[in-house]
Image: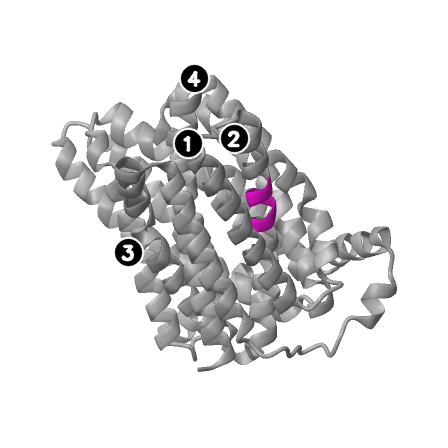
């Protein structure tokens, strides 16, 4: 078995475990507190430390072998889940224990995500990054596909402590698989990085993003997408399907399933067509992605007189298409970062990227929520994605200009 296959198996196990907790934990906290406001406060408090510590984690990770950090992170998650399961079995439901558990799980989950991203780059040749990122996308989505259903089933039948015990077992298995990966690294060590101070490392990471124009452009585009589009699941989709078309909440989950199907199909397409340089078409894919969302918005505006279930069928089709295109954007962009950002600063780069996204997404959700309540979720969807298209055209105006001139020249030659 190859090194990357070991990483994929370990990632499947940890991703499956990580997808169960966000679904079941809110149910348990709501049952424990009997208050939506306390439940919201709980998750705000528990997520803040991991968000604020993300840049520091990125710098710290660079001191050590990424395999060791990945192994340490997933093993720590296994230990935390084992301890929490035992506390719950003995009836220790103290709120402070739950807060500490949730904070530590969020921190080490973030550490696992950052270290495994860099480890992935170390194990894969640059020429095969898009292919293996496509495979990773397929496996990630297949891993989390049945996690919510299994988690809620176990929670309903056996209780929260049994769910946490299952997570502990999954994390132990993931740690065992990680242990089989040979210790190798493309960059041959981090001696120079270790000698730098934390402040120097942090400044180097910021300086790299600021001075590398291509990296900065994609970095800012991701922030724009996160601000204008990341609120779809929380605001626009429920606003259109449930609030406007009054569809049953019991079938609303099909929207996420349709999107996941598109993601899986896209991952298979990328893996089977590894010779296609998707990165060269990323500006067109950005625009196409937003155009599909604009179509969803216009469909909601103009099909209000149609049967709601006919409209919902159309939405499911668009969501499959959207999932397919989204991965055609995300995979080459991730591969671009992995190939262009030096290995010795990759963990701090991805940490800064994650930190910025975690700050911008709540702001985008807040903005979209207020705008949707004023003018409607579908109109907001249209406006947000038109703004994204404008931003993309501005960012890629030179490439778009060259393509347009080439198109006109071709037409002119054909007319002669």
Q: Secondary structure at mark 3?
A: helix
Q: Which residues are magenta?
A: 104-109
- The tag earlier along the polypeptide, 3 or 2, is 2
Q: Residues within 10 Å of mark 4 (few under 14, many from 20)?
A: few
Name of the residue lying farthest toward the bottom: 1
The answer to if 241 sits in the magenta stretch is no
Vertical comparison of 84 with 302: above or below: below
Q: Quadrant of the N terminus?
A: bottom left
- The tag earlier along the polypeptide, 1 or 3, is 1
Alpha carbon separation for disc pair 2 and 1 = 8 Å
Alpha carbon separation for disc pair 4 and 1 = 11 Å
Alpha carbon separation for disc pair 3 and 2 = 29 Å
Q: Is residue 404 left or right of residue 262?
A: right
Q: Check if mark 2's residue and mark 1's residue have beta carbons within 8 Å.
A: yes
Circle number at residue 26: 1
Q: Check if mark 1's residue and mark 3's residue have beta carbons within 8 Å.
A: no
Q: Is residue 322 left or right of residue 387?
A: left
Q: Which residue is mark 2?
A: 43
Vertical comparison of 377 with 252: above or below: above
Vertical comparison of 32 with 2: above or below: above
Q: Which residue is mark 3?
A: 261
- The tag earlier along the polypeptide, 4 or 2, is 4
Q: Check if mark 4's residue and mark 2's residue have beta carbons within 8 Å.
A: no
Q: Is residue 401 left or right of residue 344?
A: left
Which dot, 1 or 3, sits closer to the camera? 1
**To which quarter of the image does residue 191 belong?**
bottom right
At horizontal 73% and vertical 79% (from top left) the residue drawn is 188
Q: Check if mark 4's residue and mark 1's residue have beta carbons within 8 Å.
A: no
């Amino acid at each position: 078995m190859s090194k990357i296959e070991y990483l994929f198996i370990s990632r499947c196990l940890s991703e499956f475990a990580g997808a169960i907790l966000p679904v079941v934990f809110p149910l348990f906290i709501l049952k424990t507190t009997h208050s939506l406001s306390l439940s919201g406060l709980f998750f705000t408090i528990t997520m803040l430390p991991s968000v604020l510590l993300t840049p520091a984690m990125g710098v710290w990770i660079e001191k050590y072998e990424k395999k060791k950090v990945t192994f340490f992170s997933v093993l720590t998650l296994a230990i935390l889940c084992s301890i929490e399961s035992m506390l719950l079995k003995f009836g220790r439901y103290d709120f402070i224990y739950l807060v500490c558990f949730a904070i530590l799980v969020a921190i080490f989950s973030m550490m696992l995500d950052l270290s495994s991203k860099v480890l992935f780059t170390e194990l894969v040749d640059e020429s095969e990054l898009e292919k293996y990122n496509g495979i990773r996308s397929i496996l990630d989505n297949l891993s989390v596909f049945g996690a919510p259903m299994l988690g809620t089933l176990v929670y309903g039948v056996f209780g929260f402590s049994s769910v946490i015990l299952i997570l502990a077992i999954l994390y132990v298995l993931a740690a065992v698989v990680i242990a089989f990966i040979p210790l190798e690294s493309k960059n041959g060590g981090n001696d120079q990085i270790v000698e730098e101070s934390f402040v120097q490392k942090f400044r180097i990471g910021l300086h790299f993003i600021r001075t590398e124009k291509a990296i900065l452009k994609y970095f800012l585009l991701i922030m724009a997408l996160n601000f204008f589009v990341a609120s779809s699941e929380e605001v626009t989709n429920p606003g259109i399907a449930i609030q406007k078309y009054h569809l049953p909440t019991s079938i609303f989950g099909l929207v996420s399933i349709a999107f996941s199907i598109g993601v899986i199909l896209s991952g298979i397409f990328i893996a089977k067509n590894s010779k296609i340089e998707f990165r060269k078409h990323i500006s067109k894919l950005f625009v196409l992605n937003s155009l599909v969302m604009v179509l969803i918005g216009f469909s909601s505006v103009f099909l209000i007189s149609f049967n709601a279930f006919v409209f919902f069928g159309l939405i499911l089709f668009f969501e499959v298409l959207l999932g397919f295109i989204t991965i055609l954007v995300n995979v080459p962009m991730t591969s671009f970062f992995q190939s262009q950002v030096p290995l010795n600063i990759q963990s701090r780069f991805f940490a800064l990227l994650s930190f910025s996204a975690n700050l911008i997404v709540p702001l985008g959700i807040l903005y979209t929520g207020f705008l949707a309540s004023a003018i409607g979720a579908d109109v907001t969807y249209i406006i947000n994605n038109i703004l994204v298209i404008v931003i993309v055209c501005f960012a890629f105006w030179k490439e778009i200009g060259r393509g347009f001139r080439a198109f006109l020249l071709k037409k002119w030659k054909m007319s002669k």
